[in-house]
Image: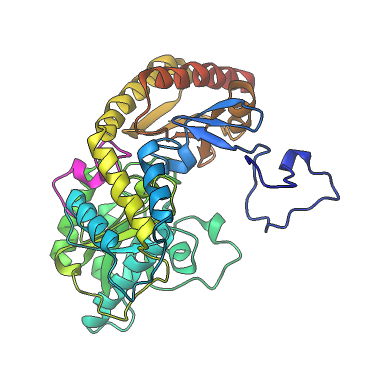
Amino acid sequence: MTVPPNFTSVKKQTNNQTSSLMPTYARQPIAFVRGQGSYLYTEDGTAYLDALTGIAVCGLGHAHPVVAQAISEQASLLVHTSNLFEIPWQEAAGQLLTHVAGMQQVFFSNSGAEANEAAIKLARISGHKKGFSSPKIIVMEKSFHGRTLATLSATGNAKVQAGFAPLVEGFLRVPFGDVDAIKQLASQHDDIVAILVEPIQGEGGINTAPQGFEYLNQLRDLCDQHDWLLMLDEIQTGNGRTGKYFAFQHTSITPDVLTTAKGLGNGFPVGACLVQGKAVNLFAAGNHGSTYGGTPLACRTVYTVIDCLQKEGAIENAAKMGAYLVEQFQQKLAQYQVSVRGFGLMIGIELPIACGELVALARDEKHLIINVTADKVVRLLPALNISQADADEIVNRLVPLISNFIQSKA
């Protein structure tokens, strides 16, 4: 069975037919029933080249055979016991994940937002241990950390915050990349305890700081100087997306707190909050928890994904194919005043005009799945193990689409 009984797609619904789902998503009028590698398929077998992978989730592509087998086998053995008991796969996944991250301990959650909630709680408990009644966390403009109330409050996007006041207090916001603004805050507040930042702002438009990854070095120095926690949100940049296992590994620094999700489970919902150094053992038993966090099924999936990413050279391929795609787009779109940026297979093509229409045009005319963020940025997040042929196919489908779109708006 490829679709549920009595399924009615969005495009087939009439005005008097309504979905039982809350209208929280502006869904596209298409449904996929199968995936294989870099391709998604509709019920009639039409293939779509997926350059989004569930928004940086399926780094190993769709229906990866080793991951699928691990999920199937574990589901037939044991799905859940709760964290009242030892979970061998959680221990194994934790050891492997902390090893590739260069961290010491991990808490498994169900999502990136929950991982960031854990990071925020770590920052606050560190402040209370110092005697601060209202500890502050520095966050960035144009950031995105999640949609729970705390992570929404940390997010630097007024549009996604609208309608949800009062927001959670305790966040101080500065422009992304502005070290002087952070120094100014340090002189004004003696109860700052942490900086929470994305190495690359994904939802914000594939933004790197003006000084590149040197920004992270500068933040590390400031945190060391003031005894703050450096907390990196690598929900989107982690798990090989930028050509390193984590984006901070393009530098020589290590964060105190690291969060990740998305590609961690290749589509299985799981997140993680990792700590090292002065963030170790900030939580004691009872300070934090999750009913579903770190189940045998989730953690066997995590272990398998990390193992496959390493053994199959997917991260190295991401670095190679990402550099190739950036070069191709820069060359072929040079005359259209576009800016192409990114690391690994986290690529943004910024147009001189708003380009949200390109999502539907790419889907319907080119059978290509893309995303537009920050109004003007085409975001590409293909599978890390994408082939040269499929990378070329993305270029061949997208370049004429962008060039024709820009010309039509001139």
For image coordinates 26% across by 70% down, the residue present is 193
For image coordinates 33% across by 41% down, the residue present is 208
* Most common SS among magenta residues: loop
Which residue occupies the foreground of this view, 158 or 48? 48
Q: Quadrant of the N terminus?
A: top right
Q: Is residue 192 left or right of residue 166?
A: left
Q: Quadrant of the C terminus?
A: top right
Residue 9: tell me if it is visible.
yes
Which residue occupies the foreground of this view, 221 or 45? 45
Give x and y (percent) for residue 251.
Answer: 17, 44
For image coordinates 68% across by 55% down, the residue present is 23
The residue stretch that appears in magenta: 239-254
Q: Is residue 253 magenta?
A: yes
Q: Is residue 133 magenta?
A: no
Q: Is residue 364 left or right of residue 195?
A: right
Q: Residue furthest right?
A: 16
Which residue occupies the foreground of this view, 276 or 58? 58
Q: Is residue 11 left or right of residue 345?
A: right
Which residue occupies the foreground of this view, 187 or 106? 106
Give x and y (percent) for residue 314.
Answer: 29, 33
Image quadrant assignment for residue 246: top left
Residue 165 vs 259, above or below: the answer is below
Give x and y (percent) for residue 91.
Answer: 24, 62
